[in-house]
Image (cartoon, helix red, strand yellow):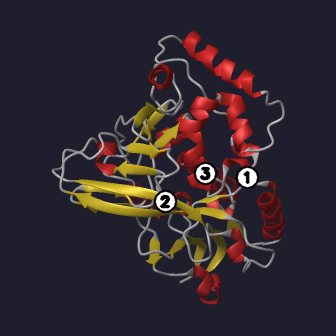
Amino acid sequence: MRYDYLIVGAGLYGAVFAYEARKRGKTCLVVEKRGHIAGNIYCEDISGIHVHKYGAHIFHTSDKKVWDYVNQFAEFNNYINSPVAKYKDELYNLPFNMNTFSKMWGISTPQEAKDIIASQIADLHITEPQNLEEQALSLVGRDVYEKLIKGYTEKQWGRDCKDLPSFIIKRLPLRFIYDNNYFNDRYQGIPIGGYTAIAEKLLEGVEVRLGVDYLRHRDELDPLADRIVYTGMIDEFYDYKLGVLEYRSVRFETEELEMENYQGNAVVNYTDREIPYTRIIEHKHFEFGKQPTTVISREYSSEWKKGDEPYYPVNNDKNNALYERYRELSRQENNVIFGGRLGEYKYYDMDKVISAALTRCAEEMD
């Protein structure tokens, strides 16, 4: 059989593209290297708990069109992301807000918090931040930086904050209200029943082949379709011939515990440099679970190397310049569409992935 589109990757971008193409009467073949659909939003069931296998995914958006679109495929609960940060034996609310400042300094009014932060920033005399440490200190002062930013960031990037470029932290939002809601977006929640069900509905009626590595079998697969939608790593598509783009990877240690409640919150960040993991996710709290056991995942950030799962791009000047060279190559492809966080070397929230896929589909077919 010949198809209109060969879609490489059954993640969110590929699944939305397949759904939209099928809706327009197009035929699609989806090939996926992993043994399951849904990409990094895949949830597996462990004792009735929907475990976010590739890290926590909390859907949030201010785009009503995207919110209405995704609600066709799932009902969302009213989960509000309110992470907790643990520094040594101290617990703080995130994002930085009056609950954080009150705990840190024993104060109660916004003006007291503003005065302390302004005083700390003034004492540092940083005019032109030369690295991430100086950038963060010039935004939030020493106390917030030392306890809640420094250790976490160094674990996340595998480098001392003095050795990281300042642009990584363009801004650090400070909220002078008692509000622990991490996101400012109007719409937020977790799909009841997990994310995999969304991908299943998007791919309903579409031929999907799992465990198929496109790049190993492209000579057999390419002739099957008129057009290719590629959501893998753009540099790997070209066999890294211009160089290797850098990513950060994440390793997970997941275990089921014989207790009902381990940490009392879905997300707890460990900001102390001496703790090797960046955070612990307790998955049942995303859906207000009442199961007798619980499942936790410790997350360890690491440098990506070939063979690892690439999680987020290192968008510094060097990598962005290299990506632009690959992008120039991709523009010369007559029948290949590059999409998603790996195909476009871009950190995408889920709503932005959906929006990008919808836009590309409309450009392609309408």
Q: Which residue is mark 1?
A: 163
Q: Position of residue 161 (x, y in %)?
A: 68, 48
Q: Which residue shows up at 29% across the image and 39% down it? A: 264
Q: Is residue 108 left or right of residue 255?
A: right
- Give the image quarter of residue 166: top right
Q: Amino acid at mark 2?
A: Tyr
Please tell me the numbered disc located at residue 154: 3
Would you call the spot at circle 1 few (<14 residues within 10 Å), some (14-19), or many (20 or more)? few
Q: Is residue 4 above or below residue 260?
A: below
Residue under pointer 2: 300
* Residue 215, position as x, y percentages in the image: 62, 82
Q: Is residue 233 above or below residue 71?
A: below
Query: What secondary structure is found at the residue carrying circle 2?
Result: strand
Does residue 246 sit above or below 102 in this rendering? Answer: below
In primary-sequence order, the first of circles 3 and 2 is 3
Residue nearest the viewer, comparing 136 with 343: 136
CA gap between label 1 and label 2 equals: 20 Å
Q: Nearer the viewer, mark 1 or mark 2?
A: 1
Locate residue 139 relative to residue 57 in the image: left or right.
right
Instruction: For mark 3, give the secondary structure.
Output: helix
